[in-house]
Amino acid sequence: MKTLILENADKGLHNKLKVMSDNQLFTPEHATEIRKRTQFTTSLEEATSNAIFIIEVVPESLVLKKALYERLEALVEDDVVMASNTSGFKPSLLAADMRRPERFVVTHFWNPADLMPLVEVVKGEHTDEDTVQRTMDVLTLMNKKAIVLNQEVPGFIGNRLQYALFREAQALLDAGAASKEDIGAAVTYSIGRRLPVTGPLMSADMGGLDIFSDIYNYLFEDLSTYQRSGEVLSQLVSEKKLGDKTGESFYAWESDVSEKINEERERTLIYFLKNDLKTGALK
């Protein structure tokens, strides 16, 4: 089993490096150098023997993460930064039992992490500024767009915005206000075209805050206030129709459809990443 895990990890790295070099995001020589510098192991002791910065990406289980931190603190020096790729746990909660919580921080990479520049850096109650600065330095070297949250909130920034949109999409679908295809098109062919250039607050500035304020004042009363998953979503989950990984859910995911959509998303993300690097947006 261990051998298969390492083989799959190596294969995954090879495929991602090939995509990056094939699309001139870096040279084949650079890809080869990255592969040479990457080591795979199932030994925590071996993986951390010379570590100065650790990012854990274990599943979203509080018990599992805390158990890992306990082992790590027994293995590494006190000045080693320990970061979590959690999608929503507050860092203060994750670090509550740590001996050195000041060296703990959240670094939430967005999926797919090789093509998405954003990393949300979230300080805990005890995280010190040296830890934050070292984290920002590492992410800058990685050509990531790192943003720092001034206070820890569940879901951070990106997921809060994403799920606010998802909640309203669910409500519209449950109410029969429109088909799933037209709900998707309403995003893809409108705000989805605008948001890569102007985020929500800048979009409001450009449209006129008086106009946006008037719309807020009558529209907010009618927006969804779902506190749980919507009816259609809950039904699909109960039927184990979970999306691409199971072959059906909101949409049917035959293998050719899945391959086509994933390739299209990859091409689009590569286009934006190339533009980011060309314009210096990630510096």
Image (tube, rainbow, N blue to C red):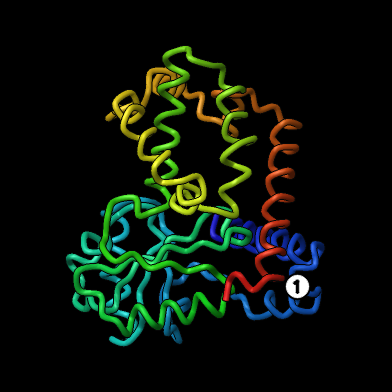
Marks counted in the figure total 1
Tell me the SS state at disc 1.
loop
Residue 165 is drawn in which quadrant?
Answer: top left
Residue situated furthest top in the rendering: 176
Residue 60 placement (x, y as % from top left): 36, 51
Vertical arrangement, residue 68 with respect to residue 178, above or below? below
The residue that mark 1 highlights is: 26
Which residue occupies the foreground of this view, 263 or 256? 263
Q: In which quadrant will I find the C terminus?
A: bottom right
The amino acid pointed to by label 1 is: Phe
Vertical arrangement, residue 3 with respect to residue 159, above or below? below
Residue, x 43% and y 60% (percent of image)? 108
Residue 83 placement (x, y as % from top left): 37, 70
Horizontally, residue 241 falls left or right of residue 194, namely left
Residue, x 74% and y 64% (percent of image)? 20
Vertical arrangement, residue 238 with respect to residue 133, above or below? above
Q: In which quadrant will I find the N terminus?
A: bottom right
Which residue occupies the foreground of this view, 114 or 2? 114
Residue 90 placement (x, y as % from top left): 27, 58
